[in-house]
Image (spheres, rainbow, N blue to C red):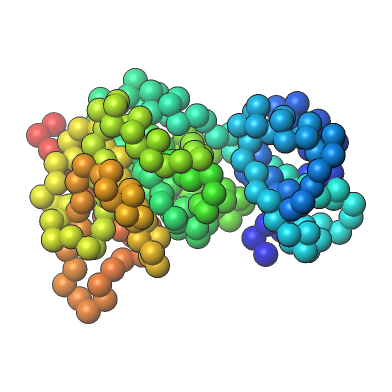
Amino acid sequence: MEEQKMQYLFGIHPVMEAIKAGKKFDKVLVKQGMEGPQFGELMALMKQNGIQFQFVPAERLNKAVRGAHQGVIAYISKIDYVPCEELVDTALATNPAPMIVILDGVSDVRNLGAIARTLECAGGSGIILPAKGGAAINADAIKASAGALMRLSVAKVPNLRLAVYYLKQCGFKIIAVTEKVSGHIYETDMTGPCAFVMGSEGRGISQSMLDLSDEKASIPMSGEISSLNVSAAAAVVLYEAVRQKTAGK
């Protein structure tokens, strides 16, 4: 089970103390049907600090922890996430044409790590992940990234659409990389600030994110297999962007 590879705290009081001490959490699992004054205090504290939580059946908590978890398990983040606005503002302040990757539904930690490694090598600025449904940044993801996840800025957002709106306001072109269009990445202008939306291999990019994208571009395929692994696709796209940005320099 993926969660068992992550550091965690359990119990209402220890989790509240960790929040007050400024610990960063990847996620907090809360037993369905919880109530009481201490639980109310914990919920208020999580909302106040922008900590994402998920209500789950008691069986899931019992499988994860052998002990008196009191209906709460908090998984400690291995990196410090940054606010989306900070990621975007810093990217623009340090690079006239930054690259950011938005992962929509990519849940495999090895793909996340491989994408981060390529992005860091290509001089990218950061990754934006959904707070729910995205890959966890754990030891496996960091290993697959060759440590790049410790150097890149990573933002976890409750709503990818709001992140895209902010990127647009800041002058980023939103490019959805999908095999479902005829236009190619080699026909897409990537010389300015770009945010590339990459979807999972199974479901692809959600319709709402496709609708928000400024352009949709595919990677040309000549073989019988009609798609690349998402991390391989990200590498192709990012280095086409690097080629365009460095052409003529």
Residue 65 lies, in percent from the top left, at 81, 57
Q: Residue at x 61, y 50 (%)?
A: 138
Residue at 77%, 63% in the rendered image: 59
Residue 143 in the figure: left or right of residue 182: right
Which of the two residues, 46 or 19, is positioned nearer the viewer here?
46
- Is residue 219 something one can see in this rendering? no
Quarter of the rendering containing residue 50: top right
Q: Residue furthest right?
A: 68
**Quarter of the N terminus within the rendering:** bottom right
- Label total for image: 0
In the rendered image, residue 214, in percent from the top left (x then y), is placed at 21, 42
235 relative to 28, above or below: below
| Residue at 28%, 51% in the rendered image | 210
Residue 199 lies left or right of residue 97; in this view the side is right
Front position in the image: 241 or 218: 218
**Is 172 left or right of 44, judged from the image as shown?**
left
